[in-house]
Image (cartoon, rainbow, N blue to C red):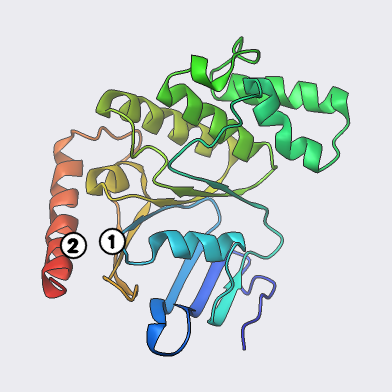
Amino acid sequence: MTTITASRTDANAVDIDDISKVFGRGQGAVTAIDGMSIHVRKGEFLAILGASGCGKSTLLSLVAGLETPTSGNVSVGEHRVAMMFQEAALFPWLTVGANVEVPMKVDKVPKAERDKRVADLLELVRLTGFDRKRPHELSGGMRQRVALARALAQDADVLLMDEPFGALDAMTRDILHDELERIWRERSLTIMFVTHNVREAVRLGDRVVLLSSRPGRLIAEFEVAGERPRRIDSALIAEQAAGITDRLRAEVARHA
């Protein structure tokens, strides 16, 4: 029996307790996640690593309420959750401002307030003056900034990010790392960030969790050392990333 309950611990934004997720039934059933427990502190930047098919995206979908656990509990208490995907998924027929405005229209926010919040959010992601542009007129990095603004338009304090920078070039990704860290601090967000990039995880995360190959289980946690802001090419990041990479390689080899 699965229940969604109020948060057990005031210090946590997300409590994931012994969850499992099975897709399908009978001989065709696939266990994506098996007995996973993770507790995400308020204001924490949690990076999630694992091989393809380990259940990282499924985990975010469970926290977002897009999927229901087969067993176990997921709790976000009174926190509002928004999700951001690898693809910006903007509506091509809408302007930048109208794309950001969509969640507020759904919530029936009055127009004057919507206009002000759109302007504030575009300033936050450094896209002031682009409100009348269409998505096809923007670079990939700019489209992801719009997607981030749209996610923040939901007044969420828990942001789920599923490889949002995976399709971007290295320089754009590095710039957006800085921007995301700034917004995370300014908005006092809790972030769960899925990535395949170990250095990206160490660059951004307060903590890195490593999931096993399918079925996904929590097999290791790493507290990230080093003051912010961090550089992805720094010696400290490289050293910590190397240790996590070795553990990830061992896990992949075990299931090869």
Q: Which residue is mark 1?
A: 50
* Observer able to see residue 12: no
Location of residue 127 in the rendering, given as x and y in whole percent from the top left corner: 56, 17
- Give the amino acid at mark 1: Gly
Relative to 25, does residue 251 appear above or below in the rendering?
above
Horizontal relation, residue 177 to residue 107: left or right: left
Location of residue 18 in the rendering, given as x and y in whole percent from the top left corner: 47, 81
Location of residue 41 in the rendering, given as x and y in whole percent from the top left corner: 51, 60
State which quarter of the image contains the C terminus. bottom left
Q: Residue at x 42, y 41 (%)?
A: 164
**Mark 1 element type:** loop
Q: Work out whether mark 2 precedes mark 1 in sequence or the reverse, and give the earlier one.
A: 1
Query: Any mark on residue 248, and which?
Result: 2
Horizontal relation, residue 253 to residue 183: left or right: left
Q: How many marks?
A: 2
* Residue contact at pointers 2 and 1, CB within 8 angstroms: yes
Relative to 97, does residue 105 appear above or below in the rendering?
below
Location of residue 58 in the rendering, given as x and y in whole percent from the top left corner: 46, 64
- Give the amino acid at mark 2: Leu
**Mark 2 element type:** helix
Question: Are there few (<14), some (14-19), or many (20+) residues within 10 Å of tag 1?
Answer: many
Relative to 214, does residue 248 appear above or below in the rendering?
above
Q: Quadrant of residue 229?
A: top left
Horizontal relation, residue 226 to residue 189: left or right: left
